Image (cartoon, rainbow, N blue to C red):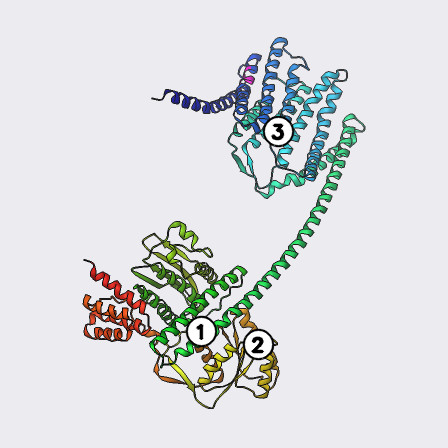
Amino acid sequence: MYPNRTRSARRVFQAALLPFWLMLTMLLLGLVYVHWLVVQWGAQSLWVSNLLFQLPLIPAALLAWYVVASHQQGKRRAWAFVALAVTAYLVASFIWWYLQESVDVPPFPSLADALYLLYTPFLVLAFLFFPHGPYRPVEALRLGLDIAIIVAAAAVFSWYFLLAPTILAFPDQPLALAVALAYPVMDLVLLSLVLLMVLRQPRGEPLKQETLYLGGGMVLMGMADSFYFFGVVEGTFTNSSWYNAGFIGSNILVALAAYTSLSGRSAFEWRKPGWQWPRLYLPYAAVLASYTLMLFRASEGDGLASIGVQWGAAIVTLLVIARQIVTFAENDRLNRELQANSRRLEEAKDKAEAANRAKSTFLSVMSHELRTPLNAVLGYAQILLQDKALSERQVLGLSTIRSSGQHLLTLINDVLDLAKVEAGRLELVPGPVQLPDFLVAIGDMIRVRAEEKSLLYQQETSPDLPQAVTVDERRLRQVLLNLLGNAVKFTDRGQVTLRLLLRGQDEDEVRLRFEVEDSGVGLTPDQRERIFLPFEQVGDLTRRAGGTGLGLPISCQLVRQMGGDIQVESEPGRGSRFWFELRLPLADARPAQQAQHRVIGYEGAARRILVVDDVAANRALLQALLGELGFEVLMAENGEEGLRLAAESPPDLILMDRVMPVMDGLAATRKARALPALETVPIIMVSAATTQDDRTDAFAAGANAFVTKPIDLQEVLQSIGTLLDLVWRYDSVPDEPASESRAASATLIPPSRVTLEALHRLALAGNLRELHQRAGQLAAGDPRHRPFAERLMRLADDFRSRAVLKLIETHLGEKAQP
């Protein structure tokens, strides 16, 4: 159907097989020649020996020229000279055959010798065009000296065993003497090329096959030449001499080097430390060998060979001295560079440490400046929400202020936490955590957000879960709330589940698996790779509101610091599952917390508390809180004024801000501990900085407790009660305990459509009081509708009108479906 295309493909296939068949033919003919040398069949026939000698050389030359035609322009010139070397040797062998057949013993020197000698110059030219790495002048000089030392030592031996006897053997034949001396000299040049290959091979880089074959071919040629020369001098050379195989093997290896250069494959990895020895010790071994020969033959007197050995040893010595001078100069340069680099590294280290100190200072100041205004906002919201005379509208407004302030605080914490992560200053503060209470608190925070979207929130735990573990409760809560918050955000229907599973336990520690699973929109593979990057948010734009894209990156870093790693499985449209495992030390369990009551005062005489803070709003906040509970409150603007007031009227307890003008809280605390009247007065350090270093500094200065801004009123009262050993008086009506959270996982069975529409009208009108009453009637009338009614009542109690409306509308939509 396509004859032209078929013929073209066949030609390409045949062209690809051509070098393989040439290589195979070359190897087979080489084996035939070696077999002839061993068996010696037809040894007396010159034409048989010469024919068998030529046959492997023919495919070797053809293969070399095929490689030249196949190479790109950059390497073609170098391998062309290699092909010329093999071709020159082939032509010289044919000329030798002709002369030997014509005159039985070919004349010496002859044209064949000239072509044989061209083998080495062609290889030298090839090496000039082979690519090699860049060398600095000093490196090139040292490499040249190393080669010169070794070649000079080899020349000493060549002089003693070859050159000097050759000079004496041709006293009146200058041309024959020149040709005879050229052979060992060319062998020394081949040795130089091999050394160049060995010494400039970069350590740690793989040795290529072409380099291995080419070097082996040149070594084999030099050895065969040496044996041939000895045979000629002693008159023992014949066509069947065993070392003739070295000439054939050398050309075969060179042709194989050309063939393997097309693929560029590696022979083996040049990575062993021992391969460094040629560069380090070979020149010194050459010196030792030349001096050993000189001492061994010193008894021969002033003969030509001995004099040459002595001069050669002197030349080798001078080359070694030159090499040492270059080495010392290079070492001195390297030492100067090392010292300069050390100075630069030290300067860079100082700059980095200064930058880290500046960043730490910035974080501390920024944390203080951002948290201080929120302290008043959240503090007053907590105080005002305790007033039971508030109307529904007032409670709703204060709740909105408080939740908005908490959201802003979360954003501030995320930004500051990211900066701490980048600075390597994010610290963990492990402590005992009661797992049941911890899970209830998590559930209470997430359940409300899930109910606003009419989602089912579930918690599943292993039955043999330990009661308490040691972990940084704040950071673990931060991680779980982030994962659960994302699950709620990206889920429209279905459920969100938190699982805490026991994976293993021994006497001292436990392995826990935390899982967060949802039935939401899921993630694509690309999104799974990006979600852990800072400021990266996935999903459509409507779901990105209310976040910074820092939650997951920070959570990932926190979990890694705890010894785990967050994993994720997700498919688009089928939800997501995030999980991590932690090994946590066991802690002592404590009795379950009783229902909490609102503190309204304390037993005993009135106590005096000194509040030291430079922000008037913070002082007014604490005065309002503590004054309402019956404390006498003194106030100071800075540490110096606080010490003066404390000296005039010693307080029972001091609330000391850490950062203030004139005198900060740390300095004021140290001076207070030095005064006899204030030595034992409890001091609570109040700080907007939350790192472990800040806590350590506060306690080192003499503080008895440490609380952070924005102030949590319950935390402050707990610290005051502990330090002053107070017995609190509580309101008779308790707050709803966390342990009495409603079972949100219960199946919701809505009432009839008529009842739902009535509830919907109340929700649209904002009449949550009436809606609460109707829900209570619904719960009392039919037990099947009780979970639905109780959820409505909880949402109405919390004044979450939008959540109420969405819950009713969701079930109205389900009733409307056929």
Front residue of 709/149: it is: 709
- The label on residue 129 is 3
Badge 3 density bin: few <14, some 14–19, many ≥20, Cα 10 Å: some
Main SS, magenta residues: helix
Front residue of 77/735: it is: 735
Q: Is residue 294 above or below residue 349?
A: above
Boundaries of the magenta span: 51-56
Sequence-earlier tag: 1 or 3: 3
Residue 459 position, x and y percent, is: 33, 65
Query: Would you identify the image quadrant in which residue 498 lies?
Result: bottom left
How far separated are the C-alphas under marks 1 and 3?
79 Å
Front residue of 704/585: it is: 704
Residue 323 falls within the magenta-colored stretch: no
- The label on residue 639 is none
Sequence-earlier tag: 3 or 2: 3
Question: For the point 53% across and 70% down, which residue is it?
Answer: 368
- The label on residue 665 is 2
Q: Which residue is mark 1?
A: 378
